Image (cartoon, rainbow, N blue to C red):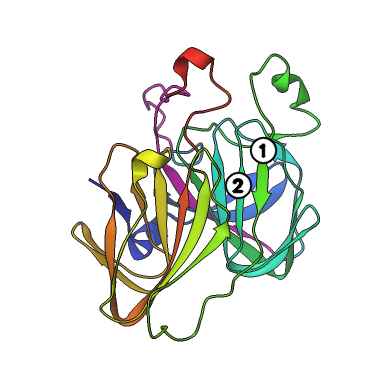
């Protein structure tokens, strides 16, 4: 069964954080992270485990998050504001992908701040900032991989018919990002989850109805790689969706552990 996370419910978890000297707000949607873990929380899952994490970061105007890496594969979707990631300009709806242990950044927020959903399919302890954490990369099995899509602003109105566009081109190992725009009442069937290592569906505009529930804007759903293909229908105002799919296998694991 898909894991659904309502943006309205998630807002109750919004909290001020400080990471590497940068103040921001973080709202947790799915999973445990270093800011919401209970003191007596169990040991985190291993690197080979599918463990969805989703949270919204609100980075304030003019702030700079230094280059860093993570211990899990990750997508980020810009949902508000503007800024830059390295040399790439960011605004809604831009999608960024990075492999585990692939450094990226810095992330610079524009005059209106920069808000982005961070989505992972494995547990991560939090950003490992460079250059201080460079030593942690020694001896790690990894493959540098990063992709940034061109921004595709959300449409003000629903289309007359189903429209699909790639935000990141599909790779041989299944990594991809798509945008689906649906007119009122239309239904879309997503790609087979077995073609990747988990999917997130993010509502950019309108309402998404599924057998598991209805989600409004800034809500998301996670579909594991062993789940059947996910189907969603648009509400009366249509639906604008972003779907991201993680690549099969995990380059940071020994060959014997890659599924």
When the figure is inspected, residue 50 is found, relative to residue 35, above or below; the finding is above
Q: Horizontally, is 179 left or right of 142 in the view?
A: left
Tell me residue 116's x, y (percent).
57, 58
- The vertical placement of 174 against 117, above or below, is above
Residue at the outermost left position: 211
- The picture quadrant where one finds residue 204 is bottom left
Identify the residue at horizontal 45%, vertical 86% (top origin). 157
Marks 2 and 1, how far apart at CA: 8 Å
The extreme front residue here reads 172
Disc 2 packing (10 Å; few <14; some 14–19; many ≥20): many
The quarter of the rendered structure image containing the C terminus is: top left
Q: Residue at x 59, y 71 (%)?
A: 152
Q: Quadrant of the N terminus?
A: top left
- Nearer to us in this view, 87 or 63: 87
Whole-percent x, y for residue 228 in the image: 25, 45
SS label for mark 1 = loop
Mark earlier in primary sequence (2, 1): 2
> Are the residues tagged 2 and 1 within 8 Å (C-beta)?
yes
Q: Which residue is mark 2?
A: 97
In front of the other: 145 or 205: 145
The disc at residue 101 is: none
Give the extent of the magenta segment: 37-61
Is residue 66 a member of the stretch shown in magenta?
no
Quickly name the residue at label 1: 145
State whether the magenta stretch is mostly helix, strand or loop.
Answer: loop
Query: Which percent across, then down, holds residue 161?
Result: 37, 80
Give the x, y percent position of residue 18: 64, 46
């Amino acid at each position: 069964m898909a894991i659904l996370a309502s943006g309205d419910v998630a807002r109750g978890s919004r909290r001020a954080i400080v990471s590497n000297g940068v103040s921001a707000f973080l709202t947790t949607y799915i999973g445990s992270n270093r800011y919401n873990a209970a003191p007596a929380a169990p040991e985190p899952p291993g690197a080979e485990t599918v463990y969805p994490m989703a949270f919204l970061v609100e980075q304030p105007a003019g702030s700079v998050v230094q280059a860093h890496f993570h211990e899990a594969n990750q997508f980020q979707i810009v949902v508000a504001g503007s800024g830059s990631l390295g040399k790439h300009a960011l605004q809604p709806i831009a999608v960024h992908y990075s492999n585990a242990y692939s450094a990226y950044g810095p992330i610079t927020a524009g005059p209106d701040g920069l808000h982005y959903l961070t989505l992972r399919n494995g547990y991560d302890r939090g950003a490992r900032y460079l250059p201080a954490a460079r030593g942690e990369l020694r001896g790690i099995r990894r493959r540098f991989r990063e992709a940034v899509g061109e921004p595709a602003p959300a449409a003000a109105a629903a289309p007359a018919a189903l429209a699909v566009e790639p935000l990141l081109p599909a790779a041989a190992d299944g990594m991809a990002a798509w945008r689906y725009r649906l007119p009122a009442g239309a239904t879309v069937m997503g790609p087979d989850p077995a073609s990747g290592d988990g999917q997130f569906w993010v509502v950019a505009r309108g309402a998404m109805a599924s057998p598991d529930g209805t989600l409004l804007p800034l809500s998301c759903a996670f579909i594991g790689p062993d789940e059947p293909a996910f189907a969603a229908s648009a509400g009366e105002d249509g639906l604008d969706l972003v779907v991201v799919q993680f690549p099969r296998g995990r380059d940071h694991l020994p060959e014997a552990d890659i599924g």
